Image (spheres, rainbow, N blue to C red):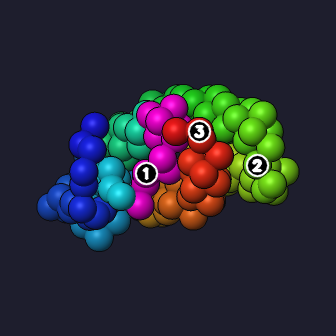
Amino acid sequence: MPTNPKSHVRTTLAPLRLRAARLDLPLVSEENVTLLTWSHECIVGVQAMDDQHGILMDTLNDLRHMLVRGNNRREISLQLERLIEFTQMHFQSEEQLLEQQGFPGAHEHRTAHQALLARLYTALEQVNREETVHFSSLLEFLPAWYLDHVEQLDQPYGKWLNEHGVL
Ligand SMILES: [Fe+2]
Ligand SMILES: [Fe+2]
């Protein structure tokens, strides 16, 4: 994983015409194809959590590749389940750390995690239920979801833990 990145690189790929036989949508538009890359804004400053965020980013990018390639609904659903499983593990690990260290916002952080997880479950339900899966909206949702978590929610605990000697 790069250690000194400058910023998020919004890599775009040429629009891909996906095989209609495998996908409900014939085209994923270019502006929706966003690759998450590591950046300063992603660094929380606690090594174990940064490592887990890196794995989370890889899992999200794998899912994004599957969406762009036009993997079928079952494969997308399984990858979303893997993402949810890892996210649950990461959230538990983070919550345990915050509680152990006495972080003042630990309770609110746990509540925010539940809301983030609920959004993933909603996305999974949509993939499993809807006749037409909105792949382009999923491609918009996934990076936004990641950034809400790592760049917004997690940053304050990183600074606080560093000040209390946890690196
Ligand atoms: Fe996190
Ligand atoms: Fe978190």
**In the visual, does 60 lie left or right of 149?**
left
- Front in this rendered view, residue 103 or 39: 103
Please identify, in this view, whether the residue under mark 2 or under mark 3 is nearer the observer.
3
**In the visual, does 97 lie left or right of 44?**
right
Q: Earlier in the sequence, mark 2 or mark 3?
A: 2
Mark number, residue 43: 1
**In the visual, does 56 lie left or right of 31?**
right
Residue 146 image point, x, y percent? 51, 54
Is 48 covered by the magenta stretch? yes
Please identify, in this view, whether the residue under mark 1 or under mark 3 is nearer the observer.
3
Ligand 1 is within 8 Å of the C-beta of the residue at disc 1:
no
What is the chief secondary structure element of the magenta stretch?
Answer: helix
For the point 84% across and 51% down, the residue is 107
The range drawn in magenta is 41-52
Q: Earlier in the sequence, mark 1 or mark 3?
A: 1
**In the visual, does 32 lie left or right of 150?**
left
Q: Is residue 122 above or below residue 128?
A: below
Residue receiving disc 3: 166
Q: Given the current orientation, which residue lies at the most extreme right position? A: 107
User: What amino acid is found at the position of numbered circle 2 in the picture?
Assistant: Phe
User: Is any part of residue 45 visible from this angle?
Assistant: yes
* Mark 3 residue crowding within 10 angstroms, few (<14) / some (14–19) / many (20+): some
User: What amino acid is found at the position of numbered circle 1 in the picture?
Assistant: Ile
* Mark 1 residue crowding within 10 angstroms, few (<14) / some (14–19) / many (20+): many
For the point 65% across and 46% down, the residue is 164
